[in-house]
Amino acid sequence: MNDSPTSLTPADAGAIVNEFLRLSMIPDPESAARYTSADLKLTFTGKRAMRQPADATRFNASRYKLVRKNIERTDVVIPSPEEATRGETIVYSIGTLYGEWLDGTPFEGNRYVDRFVVKDGLITKMDVWNDSAEWMMVRAGLATL
């Protein structure tokens, strides 16, 4: 990871995101927060607005006994001229979730996509999407797959 925003490479931005996710999944939200800006905008599924990694850890604890990510890809997007002017790099983490629901039932293959904005070496924005709500509806008998 480079210290200067002008020397942040796509590989650097991807590494920042991957280390943030690794720490978040331990979970170690305090260490993960080292990779986020003070004005982080974190939006979880269902438009749940959060301000720090510890908020996401608390939310995950309300849904899962254990949750981890199987990161299949980390895609760094070539910035648009506007994003480049703002010093932003867009990173997508794509894969599946696995773990245990609150009742201890194991799960795997739950798709996720996380979109990050990295600026000056820190994550300023994170948007989270996954299949958990759909899977929870099936478990509750409210939907079928």
Image: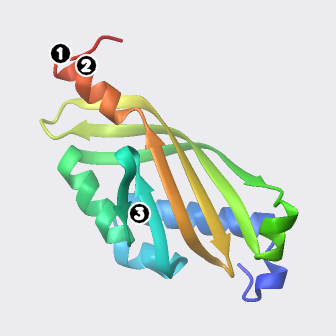
> Which amino acid lies under the numbered mark 3 shown in the image of this protein?
Ser
Task: Tally the numbered discs.
Answer: 3
- Residue 109, by quadrant, is top left
Eye-nearest disc, 1 or 3: 1
Q: Earlier in the sequence, mark 2 or mark 3?
A: 3
Q: Is residue 51 visible?
A: yes
Left or right side of 34 for 142: left
What residue sits 49% from the left and 81% below the top? 34
Q: CA distance from mark 2 to mark 3?
A: 27 Å
Q: CA distance from mark 2 to mark 1?
A: 5 Å
Q: Secondary structure at mark 3?
A: helix
Verify CB contact (< 8 Å) between mark 2 and mark 1.
Answer: yes
What residue is disc 3 on? 24
Q: Position of residue 31 (x, y in %)?
A: 42, 78
Q: Position of residue 44 (x, y in %)?
A: 40, 52
Q: CA distance from mark 1 to mark 3?
A: 31 Å
What residue sits 42% from the left and 39% below the top? 97
What residue is disc 1 on? 141
Pointer 1 local density, CA inside 10 Å: few below 14, some 14–19, many at least 20 = few
Which quadrant does the C terminus fall into?
top left
Left or right side of 67 for 43: right
Q: Nearer the viewer, residue 127 or 33?
A: 127
- Residue 138 is marked as 2
Picture layout, residue 84 above or below residue 26 = below
